[in-house]
Amino acid sequence: MPRLYHMLSAAAIWLSMAALIAGCAAGAARPETLNQRLAYAYGAHTAVLESAALQVKAGTLSKADADSILKIADESRTLLDGARSAQLVGDTSTALGRLQMASSILSQLTILLQQREGAK
């Protein structure tokens, strides 16, 4: 039963992410301001962490692969925190650059996790 619970939890996270992405693609709740874009990216970071943990529990992702993913996700978090700091001092250009790098990393990690989930 616990394995089924983790599989259902992983499915719920992916459905939530898919709904969020689909909503943004359709123009609904599209993050426009820097604050909104940062909040969206922090949410994507959390989703990557949760998905990796759930996939390890479900046996679709090895601990070694999860450790690599988490290390890269930590780097994206550092970039997000740097973007937030830059924004707070009024350096919008640096904030946007760091946000773009972090978002790119998180997008690639999300794709990787989706492929791993689909490959099981």
Image (cartoon, grey):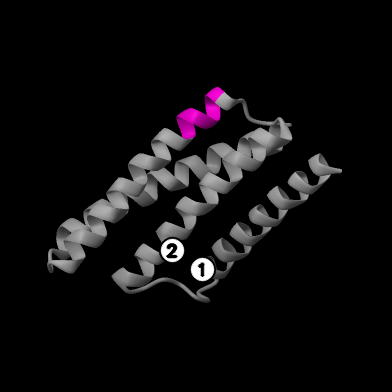
Q: Amino acid at mark 2?
A: Tyr
Q: Earlier in the sequence, mark 1 or mark 2?
A: 1
Q: Is residue 65 magenta?
A: yes
State left or right for residue 72 relative to residue 46. left
Residue placed under numbered mark 2 in the picture:
40
Image location (x, y in percent) of residue 4: 83, 44
Q: Tell me, yes or no, whether the two marked residues, 1 and 2, touch with CB atoms within 8 Å.
A: yes
Image location (x, y in percent) of residue 101: 30, 47
Q: Residue furthest front?
A: 2
Q: Amino acid at mark 1?
A: Cys
Please tell me which residue lies in front, 1 or 62. Answer: 1
Establish if 109 lies above or below 97.
above
Residue placed under numbered mark 1 in the picture:
24
Give the CA distance from mark 1 to mark 2. 11 Å
Q: Is residue 110 magenta?
A: no
Q: Which residues are magenta?
A: 64-69
